[in-house]
Image: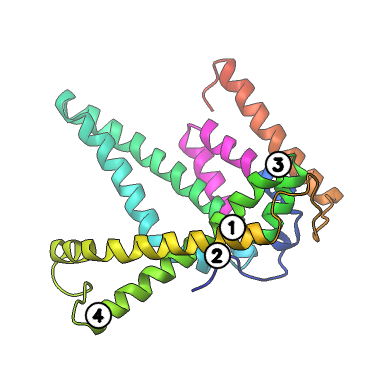
Amino acid sequence: MPAGLYEPDSSILHRADPAAKLLTAVSWFAVALLLSRPVGLILLGLVVFVLAAASGLLHIVARFGRFMALLFVMCALLWAAASIPEGGRAALRQLGSGAWLGLRLVIMLTMGLLLLASTKVEEFASALRRLGLPFLACFSLTLAFRLLPLFAASAGTIVEAQACRGLDVRQGRPLARLRGYLPLLVPLVLSSIRAADGLAVALESRGLGMLPHRTSVLQGRMRKRDLAILAASALTAIGLAMLKLSGWDV
């Protein structure tokens, strides 16, 4: 199982500085939250789609297509269901509001996927260190990126082992499959605890935390192009925030 979503490439998104990408993603998240009109959200979604296509990462977004579609539909239906007692017209209005909320969440999720698919875990750690985050916090965050796929692989191994013994939880109705996963929790938890204990011993034997200052192999530097994109994104978010505070609906 791959240790993340990263796809090696030489696109403009992959070549960008990791710290600049991280700050730009935060600015774009703010823009997505500040936009309330459908036109602005659609334009932002088109920009994100073009960026994904130009970076060759559309297949990563397509991998989560079903989840995004379900998220979009559930947001629209839940908002509409909450307004059913008020009447049909109110429910229709809330259906539209829920649809735009779902679109906003899909855009933000897509931006996060593009960031993860174009940035290595080591680059994340280096970028966070350059932005002033303590080393242990950076290490814990990047360690989570690596441990989640490992735990998922361990769960897959346990499922395959139990299927060889006659307990195939992938067969039957959804409720029966859900009940079949319950006996697998014990070996999964025990294997996770064993792996965490071994990891703690390995890190302690390597002297993690003994030195107050840490160095990194990756020494990034923001170029003029990175600074220009970051400045444009930050100014857009600040401008939208000022318009919101002034009472404008954008």
Query: Residue 83 at what x, y percent from top left?
Result: 22, 28
Q: List the residue tagged with mark 1.
A: 116
Query: Residue 232 at what x, y percent from top left?
Result: 73, 39
Query: Residue 102 at what x, y percent from top left?
Result: 39, 43
Crowding at mark 3 (Cα within 10 Å: few <14, some 14-19, many 20+): some
Precedes in sequence: disc 1 or disc 3? 1
Give the label, 1 or 3, closer to the camera: 3
Amino acid at the residue labelled 2: Gly
Judged from this view, the residue extending furthest toward the bottom is 164
Closer to us: 9 or 245? 9
Do residues under tags 2 and 1 come within 8 Å of each other at their CB atoms? yes
In the picture, the quarter occupied by the C terminus is: top right
Q: List the residue tagged with mark 2.
A: 4
Q: List the residue tagged with mark 4.
A: 163
Q: Residue at x 74, y 53 (%)?
A: 126
Do residues under tags 1 and 3 come within 8 Å of each other at their CB atoms? no
**Gap in Å between the C-alphas at discs 2 and 1?**
8 Å
Q: List the residue tagged with mark 3.
A: 134
Query: Residue 243 at what x, y percent from top left?
Result: 61, 21
Precedes in sequence: disc 2 or disc 3? 2
Amino acid at the residue labelled 3: Pro
Do residues under tags 2 and 3 come within 8 Å of each other at their CB atoms? no
Precedes in sequence: disc 3 or disc 4? 3
Amino acid at the residue labelled 1: Leu
The magenta stretch is 25-49
Do residues under tags 3 and 4 come within 8 Å of each other at their CB atoms? no
